[in-house]
């Protein structure tokens, strides 16, 4: 009998019940046996591991790890694995006005957006097959060691964001072995911070005034309290236009209006903390009531010049750092005027909008200092939201970095424990990034490890 092999046409393929008659498989291949036989053979070809079976208790037991769900603050902080997640927690816990004061920037917030994007628009270039079993993140900055290449930037009104404010920041920095900078607009005094974190490396940030007596008093207090570094901020001739604060009618301290009382009903813990702790006092001012813009304007002195910097250099005997450097020329100039270091910064995008981005400015400043044989320290802030950002900055020539919002999000998310968590997250990021880059010490980082995309 002749046998025609049919193409795989369901209409012509014999039904599986056409017992033992020779035919085709469902796929149209000749079998030389029955369809049922072919199906049985196919089933037999399924690997044992893919055959269904009833689970045994002994298989399930190790998988069953039911734990009581943990809703404590500590557990939530532990679950946050990025600074952005801390920001989400901070936003839920903090009234809108102080949250926006921290999170916001000047005008259209272009500077801040660009600064953060600058860290994203890079490519890391790793080396392979290096022994990275142990990673050392320690460094030296301004003549003293720091366990990590990052310190806490000066931030004003910190106890308004969360009542532990400067105490949480300085104690977390002390525990982490990194520098902490108290702002002239801080809400704890120089002496209180020194007492709270006695073995910490405390720096003081100064807004310089042409009123020398006022400046001198601050400088003397900083020296007496053991601060080894004075950081003078120079990007604040006048206040930036922080439009979120204007929209929120932000005042210091936050006023009880219909809006804030309503807000309080969603964030009772913040208001409870705020109202049951000592009212805000300032590092440098007596108690103040007024709008943020008014207070800031009273702080800033638009008449300052390089002569005032010279006076400061003569007066302050410790390390002097100038913060708010935005061009290569100015970086060189302040070093010529005696600065021991510069902070490339645009104040977290809170002053001039569309300002230069510190991360982009960095290679030029590094090149200029190398050419000048200058050993002045190059520090950088603005836009750092991960440890990888810090590693990228160090690779391109920064000696050290500072964080503002990254630690403030932690503070607002959970007080001291939140700042600890922010530092831990950054440390973990840095350790992992270094290992994946194939470097085990910061001194091994070079510009070859980073390519700025589009260049
Ligand atoms: C809420 C807030 C308050 C700040 N207050 C001060 C200040 O009092 N003095 C100062 O020199 N810089 C101040 N800064 C700027 C920071 O020192 C730092 O330059 C900036 O936060 C870095 O950007 P980042 O927040 O993206 O890390 C403040 C920044 C923030 C976010």
Image (cartoon, helix red, strand yellow):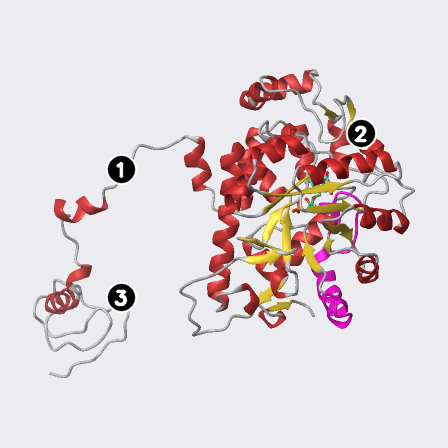
Q: Which circle, 2 or 3, is nearer the viewer?
A: 2
Residue 344: in sight, yes or no? yes
Which segment did they paint magenta? 345-374
Separation of marks 1 and 2 at Cα, in angstroms: 53 Å
Q: Residue at x 51, y 57 (%)?
A: 430
Classify residue 263 by image quadrant.
top right
Vertical side of 393 occupied by 291: above or below: above
The mark found on residue 140 in the picture is none
Of the image marks 1 and 3, the number of the one nearer the N terminus: 3
Q: Are marks 1 and 3 in contact (CB under 8 Å)?
A: no
Q: Is residue 400 left or right of residue 299?
A: left
Q: CA distance from mark 2 to mark 3?
A: 84 Å
Residue on which disc 3 sits: 10
Q: Write down the residue under mark 1.
A: 66
* Residue at figure coordinates x 69%, y 37% from the top left: 224
Q: Is residue 366 magenta?
A: yes
Quadrant in which residue 67 is drawn: top left
**How many other residues sit within 10 Å of disc 1, few (<14), some (14-19) or many (≥20)?**
few
């Amino acid at each position: 009998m002749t046998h025609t092999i049919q193409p795989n046409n369901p209409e012509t393929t014999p039904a599986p019940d056409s017992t033992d008659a020779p035919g085709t498989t469902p796929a149209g291949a000749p079998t030389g046996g029955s369809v049922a036989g072919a199906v049985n053979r196919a089933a037999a070809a399924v690997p044992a591991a893919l055959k269904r079976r009833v689970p045994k208790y002994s298989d399930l037991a190790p998988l069953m790890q039911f734990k009581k769900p943990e809703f404590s603050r500590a557990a939530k902080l532990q679950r946050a694995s990025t600074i952005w997640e801390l920001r989400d927690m901070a936003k839920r816990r903090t009234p809108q006005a102080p949250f926006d004061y921290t999170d916001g920037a000047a005008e259209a917030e272009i500077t801040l957006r660009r600064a953060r994007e600058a860290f994203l628009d890079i490519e890391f270039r790793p080396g392979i097959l290096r022994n990275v079993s142990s990673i050392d993140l320690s460094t030296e900055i301004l003549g003293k060691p720091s366990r990590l290449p990052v310190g806490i930037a000066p931030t004003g009104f910190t106890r308004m964001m969360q009542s532990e404010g400067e105490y949480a920041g300085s104690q977390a920095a002390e525990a982490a072995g990194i520098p902490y900078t108290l702002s002239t607009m801080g809400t704890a005094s120089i002496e209180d911070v020194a007492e709270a974190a006695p073995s910490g490396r405390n720096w003081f940030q100064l807004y310089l005034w042409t009123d020398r007596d006022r400046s001198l008093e601050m400088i003397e207090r900083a020296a007496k309290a053991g601060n080894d570094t004075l950081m003078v901020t120079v990007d604040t001739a006048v206040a930036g236009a922080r439009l979120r604060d204007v929209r929120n009618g932000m005042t210091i301290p936050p006023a009880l209006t219909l809006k804030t009382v309503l807000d309080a009903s969603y964030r009772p813990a913040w208001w409870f903390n705020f109202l049951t702790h000592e009212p805000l006092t300032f590092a440098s001012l007596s108690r103040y009531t007024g709008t943020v813009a008014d207070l800031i304007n009273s702080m800033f002195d638009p008449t300052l010049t390089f002569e005032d910097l010279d006076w400061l250099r003569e007066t302050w005997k410790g390390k002097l750092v100038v913060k708010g450097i935005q061009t290569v020329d100015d970086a060189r100039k302040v070093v010529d005027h005696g600065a021991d270091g510069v902070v490339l910064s645009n104040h977290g995008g809170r002053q001039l909008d569309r300002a230069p981005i510190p991360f982009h400015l960095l290679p030029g400043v590094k090149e200029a200092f190398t050419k000048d044989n200058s050993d002045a320290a190059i520090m950088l802030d603005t836009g750092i939201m991960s440890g990888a950002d810090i590693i990228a900055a160090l690779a391109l020539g920064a000696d050290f970095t500072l964080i503002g919002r990254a630690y403030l999000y932690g503070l607002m998310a959970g007080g001291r424990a939140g700042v600890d968590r922010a530092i831990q997250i950054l440390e973990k990021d840095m350790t992992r990034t270094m290992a994946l880059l194939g470097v085990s010490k910061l001194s091994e980082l070079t510009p070859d490890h980073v390519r700025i995309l589009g260049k």
